[in-house]
Amino acid sequence: MYRATGWMYGVGMIVSLMLAGTAGAQGPMGGEDLTADMNIPGVVAKVNGVELKSDYIRFRLNLDMRRIGTPLNPQQKVKLAGTIIEKEIVRELMYQEGKGKSVSPEDVEKEFQEFKKAYESKEELDQALQARGIDEAELRKGIEIDLIAKNLLDERVKGKVQVTDTMVQKFYGDKKESFKRPESFRARHIFVAYVPFDVVEKSSPEELKEIAGEYREKARKKIDEVYAKVKAGENFEELAKQYSEDKGSAEKGGDLDFIYKGVFDPAFDQAIADLKVGETSGIVETEFGYHIIRLIETKPSDYAPFEEVEEAIQKHLFMTEAQNLVARYIESLKKKAEIIVYYRGE
């Protein structure tokens, strides 16, 4: 059966991956220019005679390097710059190919308003634009270019990618090991935080350091009292509802539902591993606080049923083929274009 659902989602994802669009440059730049030592020329490339200026390349480089958080060596900087330049070349090619196609002012305005949401005020937005060396009109033009590119790719992909039931089933069979789920368990717990959540929210880091010891002593006393009640045979579910500070599970009698090992703190997993179904742990200390755990049920490692992963497989196959289509199309545009790159890091 032919499946067409999700193609708009797929194309939107492809555009974001293949184009370094204006809307992706969120957040003011600020700070020193991390590209100052890269000798990037004023014009980094020409595409069919159209110059690509370095302003955006520098802006994007600074943005990405700050997001990475660790200093890059010269080779890494050059590689990152090359990736950004390549995306800008593709973006310009798409714009040139889409000339004559228009997008509505309403669509541009909608994207512009989405872009603005990343900033708390107009002043902050203006500062970000100034750091990039553009104004609002140029930003809107950039948004228009991205929308034209997206529409062009839509035309290339829409209706041309077919994912059949047979393809989906074959993928599941061929890759079945990747759908193997680890062992899981279902447990109840009673949780007491070292410091109450509301106190953490209201206190500064310095204040927390001063009061942590006192609150931890109170937490230990509380969990000891609850554990005594558990050992005395009182109803675990009712105790969880009354004393557990994990509000999400407390109202369900401490029930955490089925979870996989590795999701919680290692000490929690180890406590589970030491229990048989129906048994209750002692007091377990994790990074977050004290727990008393009761194991309800375990499930051995198994394979996710086809029905559970069918839609995800379909989307994966669609995205893969759509990306291939787009890549071939862009390569065809490059072959017929005159592209000169002036910056290669030498």
Image (tube, helix red, strand yellow):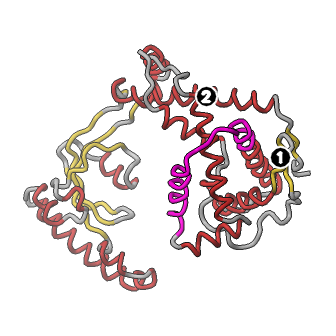
Tell me, yes or no, whether the highlighted magenta stretch contains residue 325.
no
Residue 276 position in % (x across, y down)? 23, 42
Q: Tell me which residue sits at (77%, 48%) in the image.
A: 85
What residue is rendered at 8% in x and 56% in y?
Answer: 235
Is 96 part of what is drawn in magenta? yes
Q: Quadrant of the N terminus?
A: top left
* Residue 306 x/y as whole percent: 36, 23
Labelled disc at residue 14: none
Residue denoted by label 1? 50
For the residue carrying disc 2, how many other residues have a C-alpha within 10 Å: few (<14), some (14-19), or many (20+)?
A: some
Pointers 1 and 2 in contact (C-beta within 8 Å): no
Q: Picture quarter containing residue 281?
A: bottom left
In which image quadrant can residue 3 be found? top left
Q: Nearer the viewer, residue 211 or 202?
A: 202
Label 2: which secondary element: helix
Which segment did they paint magenta? 90-119
Q: Position of residue 325 (x, y in %)?
A: 63, 26
Q: Residues within 10 Å of mark 1 (few under 14, many from 20)?
A: some
Q: Secondary structure at mark 1?
A: strand
Q: Quadrant of residue 53?
A: bottom right
Q: Residue at x 64, y 40 (%)?
A: 149
Callout 1 amino acid: Val
Where residue 156 is drawn, which disc sits there?
2
Q: Main secondary structure of the magenta part?
A: helix
Horizontal and vertical percent position of residue 280: 20, 52
Question: Mark 1 or mark 2: which comes first in sequence?
Answer: 1
